[in-house]
Amino acid sequence: MIRSMFTAVNSLYINQMYMDVVADNLSNVNTPGFKSSSVRFKDQFAQTMRVGSAPSTALGGLNPMQVGLGTNLASISPNFSQGALNSTGRDMDMAISGDGFFIYNHGDRELYSRDGSLALDAEGILVHSASGDRIQGWMANGLGQIAGGSKPVPIQVPINSTVARATSAANLTGNLSAILPYPITSRVALSGTLNSAA
């Protein structure tokens, strides 16, 4: 009698864990970068009351007699399939399409997340908008080249520097359309250079 009560209580406990996972999935429906989880169950080892036996000349074989002891939690597995990309209307927000994670620095630890809700701090460093953790990456040099293989560093946007350069020349090349109200016998190629005032 006591064993059956333990089996029932254990099953209620496992069902409560399942409901916790479902509730967590529902409560994070609108959380950026959230990955839902699923619960898998497995049988507990059954208690053998009598072992089986092979058939003999006088008797047929006997199956083992076992009593099931309920269920157990096998795993809680996150679902890493690609979710829908939604526009947030914020210029700094980013999303990852496909595999990969953002790397955030939280003091002496590196955290991995698919949440790309970003903002700039007072120093122009990209941070997570809710936690303030700095996003990590590789900075480009003056030529726009990124040196891989090194340790990622906080990404700093030069907000008060004059990195932009004025355009000094532009080339325009094209063809005039042959379909006009009056007949044109040949196409004219345009080519020119626009020079800015220095």
Image (cartoon, grey):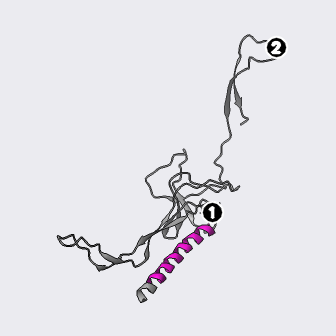
Residue at far top of view:
185
Q: How many marks?
A: 2
Query: Between disc 2 and disc 1, whose residue precedes?
Result: 1
* Most foreground residue, 133 or 33: 33
Question: Mark 2 is on which residue type?
Answer: Tyr
Question: Mark 1 is on which residue type?
Answer: Glu
Report crowding for label 2: few under 14, some 14 to 19, many 20 or more residues within 10 A (C-alpha). Answer: few
**Residue marked by disc 2:** 182
Q: Residue at x 47, y 50 (%)?
A: 147
Position of residue 148 relative to residue 27, above or below, is above
Q: Which residues are magenta?
A: 6-31
Residue at far bottom of view:
2
In which quarter of the view is residue 30 placed? bottom right
Q: Residue at x 51, y 66 (%)?
A: 38
Q: From the viewer's perspective, is the residue at label 2 or at label 1 nearer?
A: 2
**Residue marked by disc 1:** 123
Q: Quadrant of the C terminus?
A: top right
Q: Residue at x 46, y 86 (%)?
A: 5
Residue 128 image point, x, y percent: 60, 64
Q: Residue at x 53, y 49 (%)?
A: 141
In which quarter of the view is residue 195 placed? top right
| Helix, strand or loop under label 1 | loop
